Amino acid sequence: MINTLVVGEIKDGKLSENSFDLLKISDKLSDRTSLVLCTSSQDNVPLDDIKILPVDFIYLLKIPSLDIDRGIYDIDTYALSVFLNSKDFNLILFSKSEYGSVVAPRVAFRNKKKYLSDCTGISLKEDLFLIERPIYGGVAIAEYQVSTNISPVFSIRSGLQNLDDISNNKIAAIEEIDIQFNEPHPAKMIEEYSNDSLEEIKLEDAKIIVSGGRGLGNEIAFEELKKLANLLGGALGASRAACDAGWIDHSLQIGLTGKTVTPDLYISVGISGASQHLAGCSMSKNIVAINNDKDANIFNVARFGVIGDWNQIIKSFISSIEDLSLK
Amino acid sequence: MTIEIAVLAKQVLDSETPSHLFKINADSNNLEIEDNSAPIINGFDLNATEAALRLRDEGHEVNITVIMAGFNFVNEVIKKTLSMGADNLILIENESLISCDSSFTVEVLSKAINKIGNFDIILAGRHASDFDNGHVPIGIAERLRLPIITYASDIKIIDSILRIKRVIPSGYQFIESKSPCVVTVSNEIGEPRYPNLRGIMTATKKQPKIITINDLEIEPPSEKEINLTKVFIPKINLDTEYIKGDDESELGRNLAMRLKEEGLI
């Protein structure tokens, strides 16, 4: 019997999309699914919406200290570890969000559990979990076998496609657990700044993304791409090379070390397609590659390829779209 | 007072190598590069070295010790951090250190850090670009019960308190931490410096210090709890449709028509 714990995240008053995906994955894999949420007294948890999801138990950890500092997740790590000490699970799932990337390994090492991050495939064969995860920035895929007896911790890449919608007729039982944090706390968050206003449409939510890379040559070029993104009702993104060159803010970086995006249309301009970039965009439904190097790696994942000078192509592309939409 | 900084660095294959040059080595069940090109120091670990050197540039008195755990070290490669300006290099070489299960690496590096002495700051890259895990610095922090601050893009020391700018998806945070602590560094900190001639000369003369796992009184793990069963290079069967046109202007127009036809715009 597989008894799985999903560590969920609340975003904008809702269970995050990624956490919902974890519940679907767990439902397919496990006999019993539990969801745990670390909450401050200010968090408004939409329990009525969550308890009708495919989950058997919801554990609400009520942690007053989270009111003061959530920054680097010392308190979340502590609370989850205390919780895990009182319960037995065969499998603990996090999403590979920023939260999961930090908290999952901390919880794993603190509780002496084995951990694999950024898994893109998980299934069960007898008493083994079969795991697939990309390595070398996506150049290769590694397959692992992990015994269900050691209760491993995995983080799962967001945006995995082909997750079946599940019909659900159970209502979860809810348990509230109060946790007081009184450990030494030598590192604290002082201030937080959001660049969100830079993006009119969030990259993660965008249906269309126009993304630029080193091949653009300068920061002014991004104004042209911004114009195209606006015209299409999409968002602007960039490769790490363009961000590192200082042409555009790092918060728009797409790739292994930036954001993972899954739009319907991803228009890449002057991006060579290093594996670490593809790791963030290759799950887009349709990729258009515009590049003057016919051997650029990006063409390997593109549904549509355009070989030539991006500047002229984009200018003509923009004016053609304006013409087409006038018709 | 001198600030003692440890930088953890890993020797890896260059993941930016064109993907068609990668192949699978069936014996080691890992990747290798066809033309046998030299490995590199993990890029994020060079960012971490750069972060340490910038503290020196800002006038702090720092002693930078780079600790590398791995196997089959290449002499010219491992000296890179010394030629950038690091003061000491410590090597721990053992075949089990390239295993896919990083618990052993965490144990080895934690014990080495304790043995070597009183580090004020332990810096590492945010992850190694081979297995892309990012476990090791976090595991060390947990094992040594130190604060862990991930994804630093700037580090300042003010009155012996670290003030760290930390990259988050929506922007950034400022974290203040007492030392000792573990900080992982991201590419946002900026390009690692190129070694100058003097740095290269100094590095040539310096000999790395070798620590064995016997010195640390550790046995390699006898049993694997995580088994890497297969590594493969995925085949992409995508028939790219190349847009045709006599010049760029026509290409742009045809692309717009084609995407409109498909209902994508």
Image (cartoon, rainbow, N blue to C red):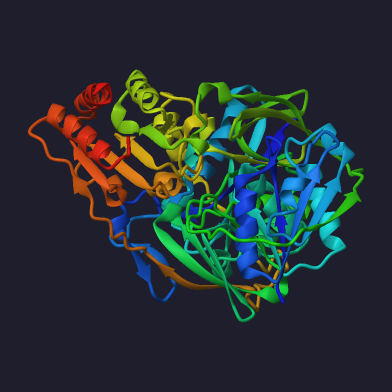
Q: Position of residue A81 (x, y in %)?
A: 81, 55
Which of these two is toward me, A134 or B78? Answer: A134
Determine whether A93 is above or below B24 in the image.
above
**Residue displayed at 47% across by 63% down:** B72
Q: Position of residue B248 (x, y in %)?
A: 14, 29
Tell me where residue A70 sits by quadrant.
top right
Answer yes or no: is residue B260 visible: yes
Q: Position of residue A39 (x, y in %)?
A: 81, 42
Q: Going by the image, does B183 lie left or right of A256?
A: right
**Residue displayed at 32% across by 63% down:** B235
Q: Going by the image, does B25 lie left or right of A190?
A: left
Which of these two is toward me, B30 or A116? Answer: A116
Q: Position of residue B222 (x, y in %)?
A: 65, 78
Q: Going by the image, does B207 lie left or right of A311?
A: right
Tell me where residue A221 sits by quadrant.
top left
Determine whether B214 is above or below A202 in the image.
below
Tell me where residue B54 sits by quadrant.
top right
